[in-house]
Amino acid sequence: MWLTDARVVDVERGEIRDGVSVEISGERIGAIQRRPGAGERMSLGGRYLVPGLISVHTHLSVVYPFSSIDLAENPALTVLRSYQRAQDALAAGVTTIRCVHEQNQADLLLAEAARAGWADVPRIVGAGRALSTTGGHGDGMGSVLADGPEAFREAALAELDAGCSHIKVFITGGIAGLGEEFDHPEMTREEMQATVSATQSHDTYVVAHAGSSLAINWALDAGIRSFEHAYDLDSETAGRMAAMGVFLTPTLCVTRSQEWMRRKGFEEFQIETSLEVGPMHLASIQRAIAAGVTMVNGTDYPPGDPIEDTSVAVYEMGLMEGAGLHPHLALQGATSNAARLLGLESEIGAVEEGKVADLVAVEDNPLAGVAAMRNISFVMQSGRVVRDDRPTS
């Protein structure tokens, strides 16, 4: 099949290849050329063709309010809830998700179902259950509790042996618990080092929920290379992150979605806390942008959920642009940079010959402003059309 009359967005160079045809050969992109070859044709009518979106901070199994979590929940119910969220994400153009803690390892189970052809969902890169200290941010959410370096090492190895692609830890508190703080570490340096050592033995990495600079510096020393939130990041630490080439997922939406939170049943103190932390969070991410930290797109909230006439994933792109990130870099954060973080840059994250045909089409040029991504009219995953809202002529 050929996708004709396309404007291919080169997310790496920030350029447009106008008026080309893209061959879809099985699950992959074949030729990209001026004239289509033989076979079925589907005209995109001059739409901009963008790589399928990648969301790298996903919780498919989460329940709201958090106090409603049932730690004894039947895993079948957890997977069923996760399945609907994953389907919503795919319809929104999110063709790959990195999960960073799912109750009952629902991400691993859902990914297995997808491989068997039983579930129509994004590509899932799973973390299984996150690791938390007793009494830490992840306690009470179905995380694996560990205390001490050896316990963290063993817990990480167990999750990896279960099929996890990476390990998630909580190195500070957050903004979900009443009276919770994020200005001091919840893991020791030795616990961080032990977790990193376990992942290195499996040729993978650690991703850290991280609220502030002290814990992030400890984590950088330990070899952690993926960080979430950064509510209070100083300029010196941001510069160090940039120099070391680590990845930051800002999740700005968690402090800028109060009406969405209220509709979902969040407790009022959580909504108030998100409002209070919001200005600090924005200033922190602006320092990271100024320092040149590599940004990736993740939402904490389900990426396919509707918010302000778009999806949460696209809403987050807009917030990143609003914080000062150039539209080109905001687009990279949801495509090529995210693919590099996942170690899948040879497979996804760009519209290039030989790569997997994960594609979305939009009416306007997203390099001129990510608001263009609000109008996704076509979604393809692995060469299969999963959504086509193009008007019929």
Image: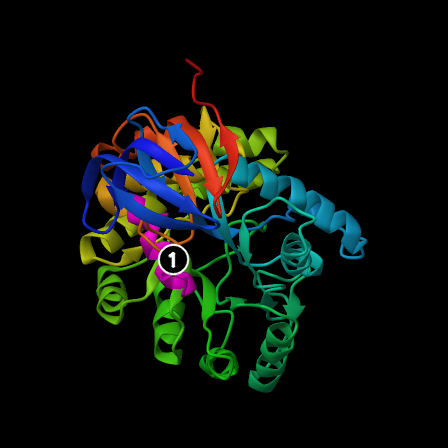
- Read off the residue under disc 1: 339
Q: Is residue 114 above or below residue 168?
A: above
Does the image show residue 263?
yes
State which quarter of the image contains the C terminus.
Answer: top left
Q: Residue at x 66, y 69 (%)?
A: 144
Residue 78: x and y, percent? 73, 50
Q: Depth check: 350 or 82 in front? A: 350
56 horizontally vs 59: left or right? left
The amino acid beneath tag 1 is Ala
Residue 101, percent across and down?
59, 59
Question: In the image shown, does 140 or 302 lie closer to the viewer?
Answer: 302
Question: Which corner quadrant holds the N terminus?
Answer: top left
Magenta stretch contains residue 339: yes
- The residue lying at 57 percent from left, 30 percent from top is 262
Residue bounds of the magenta highlight: 331-346
Against 374, residue 80 (above or below) is: below
